[in-house]
Image (spheres, rainbow, N blue to C red):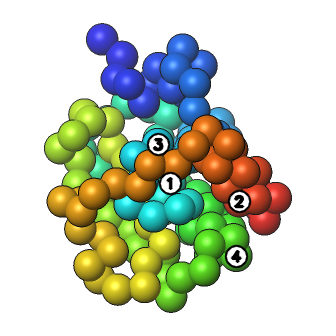
Amino acid sequence: MATIFTRIVQGEIPCYKIAEDDSYFAFLDINPLAKGHTLVIPKKENDYILKMEDADLSGLILFAKKIGLAIEKVVPCKRIGLTVIGLEVPHTHIHLIPINAISDMEFSRPKLKLTNEELAEICERIKSEL
């Protein structure tokens, strides 16, 4: 059975897509910790990042770097934090989160409630920086 992320890549579930290439896909988290919180995934399903082939993992990190640098231009922050937890969806994914303090990456914090219009506007702004 395809993961929710595979279904997003295949267009079965809508998303705020930021970028994609033949192997990787980036889209806004709809329950973000911060404006611009983005998920970066390999298109090929893989449950655990440390089990990825070296070339695929390198490609994922380089793709995430490009997206993170674009987010940084749009969302005021000190850094883009990267985290991989991998328990909530069985499909490797990197969270790119604009942060000003380490506590900004605590997933136990309440998530932002952004409107569809706000998400679409942030998505377009990030895409324009790629």
- Circle 3 residue: 30
- Circle 2 residue: 126
Q: Do the residues under discs 2 and 1 have CB atoms within 8 angstroms? A: yes
Q: Nearer the viewer, residue 26 or 102?
A: 102
Which label's residue is closer to the chain start, 3 or 4?
Answer: 3
Instruction: Report how far apart the C-alphas of labels 3 and 4 lie in the structure.
Output: 20 Å
Q: Nearer the viewer, residue 63 or 126?
A: 126
Amino acid type at image mark 2: Ile
Up-down relation of residue 85 to residue 19 (above or below)? below
Q: Quadrant of the C terminus?
A: bottom right
Which label's residue is closer to the chain start, 2 or 1?
Answer: 1
- Point out residue 75 in the picture as x, y percentages from the top left corner: 62, 72
- Point out residue 5 in the picture as x, y percentages from the top left corner: 42, 30
- Circle 4 residue: 73
Position of residue 90 in the picture relative to residue 11 (left or right): left
Q: Do the residues under discs 4 and 1 have CB atoms within 8 angstroms? A: no
User: Which is closer to the viewer, label 3 or label 4?
Assistant: 3
Instruction: Report how far apart the C-alphas of labels 4 and 1 lie in the structure.
Output: 14 Å
